[in-house]
Amino acid sequence: MSEKQAAAAPDPLAMWRDWLSQSERQWNQFLNEAMATDQFSQAMGRSMDVFLNTQKSLNEAMGRYFSALNMPTRTDVLSLGNRLDNIEQRLASIEEALAIALRGSASPAPGSSSAPAQKPARTKKPAPRA
């Protein structure tokens, strides 16, 4: 009898899942229809314009504020970073050219063999031991 009661009792989680999926489908349909209208596109465009103008004004105000405090702005720091990057690249190329020049001066002159020079034959004999 307990099996029959368990089968007859509705599962509350299943009912909740069904309600959730149905609600999600309804919201999805409603919002897709709303976003497909020209009014929505115009409203989004206007809100984007407002956001960009606000951001521009804020950046200008912060630039003036940092200038008044004699602090670098974001643009100043980025410019300094680019200059530093260029200096590092030039230094690396100078180091590479110097290494190549040092390797070149350590190599033997053109036309000579790469084997070390041989010592002359020994002609003087040591004195006999007493």
Image: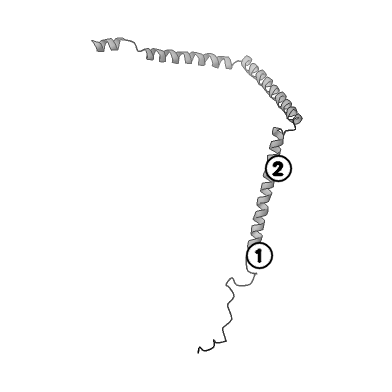
Around disc 1, counting alpha carbons within 10 Å, would you say few (fewer than 14), some (14 to 19), or many (20 or more)? Answer: few
Around disc 2, counting alpha carbons within 10 Å, would you say few (fewer than 14), some (14 to 19), or many (20 or more)? Answer: few
- Across and down, in percent, residue 93 comes to 66, 52
Residue type at numbered disc 1: Ser
- Across and down, in percent, residue 38 comes to 63, 16
Identify the residue at image location x=69%, y=24%.
55
Compared across the picture, whether 52 is left or right of 114 comes to right
Compared to residue 106, the image places residue 70 above or below, namely above
In the picture, the disc for residue 31 is none
Quadrant for residue 71, please give it.
top right
Of 98 and 126, the residue lying toward us: 126
Identify the residue at image location x=41%, y=13%.
16
In the picture, the disc for residue 83 is 2
Quadrant for residue 72, please give it.
top right
Of 50 and 40, the residue lying toward us: 50
Compared to residue 111, the image places residue 122 above or below, namely below
- Across and down, in percent, residue 21 comes to 44, 16
**Residue beneath disc 1:** 105
Compared across the picture, whether 13 is left or right of 75 comes to left
Q: In 3D space, how far apart are the residues under numbered discs 2 and 1 (Cα atoms)? A: 33 Å
Q: What element carries label 2?
A: helix
Q: Is mark 1 on a helix, strand or loop?
A: helix
